Amino acid sequence: MDTPIPPFDVQAGEGIVLETPTGDTAIVKADTRQTNGSLTVIELVFAPKQGPALHTHHREDELWVVLEGEFRFKAGGAMLHVSTGGMAFGPRGTPHAFQNVGGEPGRLLVVTTPSGLEGFFLDFAARLRGGSVGPETLSELGLAYGVEFVGPPVADSDPL
């Protein structure tokens, strides 16, 4: 069987490092070009109590693997608790958000399929270099990538 793209690896500490809308870190490990559109892999590093606003991916399914820390995931009507070595899944179309509930920075490996989500983070970082990014611009940027922000972060909607 012919392979249309070459195999590749990404070592610890490698990848494209970007700032997230929460001021945390996204490290793009695999993108659309590298995977021929099949998936995107991003490592996210969140400070304690941090996490994104409730949002829906209209294009991608999303898998979260907790590399370090303790997270809770609000997905649809469920609240899932996952610690180091565990994983959670959010199917496309399901409103979701997550929060690092530990006292130290937490790390997630996020796999989305099909690919393309890296574009949101790349475009956000580019706009951020040009100045601050307000909620309206963030919403427009999200919609351009099939991501709709639909509510507050878990820390606000479901305080600990």
Image (cartoon, rainbow, N blue to C red):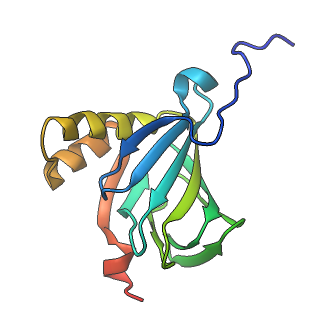
Q: Is residue 135 left or right of residue 67?
A: left
Residue 42 horizontal/vertical position (percent) = 53, 44
The vertical placement of 63 against 87, above or below, is: above
Which quarter of the rendering shows the C terminus? Answer: bottom left
Classify residue 40 by image quadrant.
top right
Residue 13 horizontal/vertical position (percent) = 57, 41
Q: Is residue 64 left or right of residue 160?
A: right
Quick check: can you spot residue 107?
yes
Which residue is found at the position 58% from the left and 26% from the top? 37
Q: Nearer the viewer, residue 45 or 60?
A: 45
The vertical placement of 35 against 112, above or below, is: above
Residue 2 horizontal/vertical position (percent) = 82, 10
Q: Nearer the viewer, residue 94 or 132?
A: 132
Identity of the residue furthest to the bottom in this view: 160
Quick check: can you spot residue 59?
no
Identity of the residue furthest to the front in this view: 13
The vertical placement of 6 against 15, above or below, is: above
Which quarter of the rendering shows the N terminus? Answer: top right
Which residue is found at the position 49% from the left and 60% from the top? 94
**Marker count (numbered):** 0
Which residue is found at the position 60% from the left and 23% from the top? 34
Q: Is residue 84 left or right of residue 2?
A: left
Which residue is found at the position 38% from the left and 41% from the top? 18
Residue 106 horizontal/vertical position (percent) = 52, 65
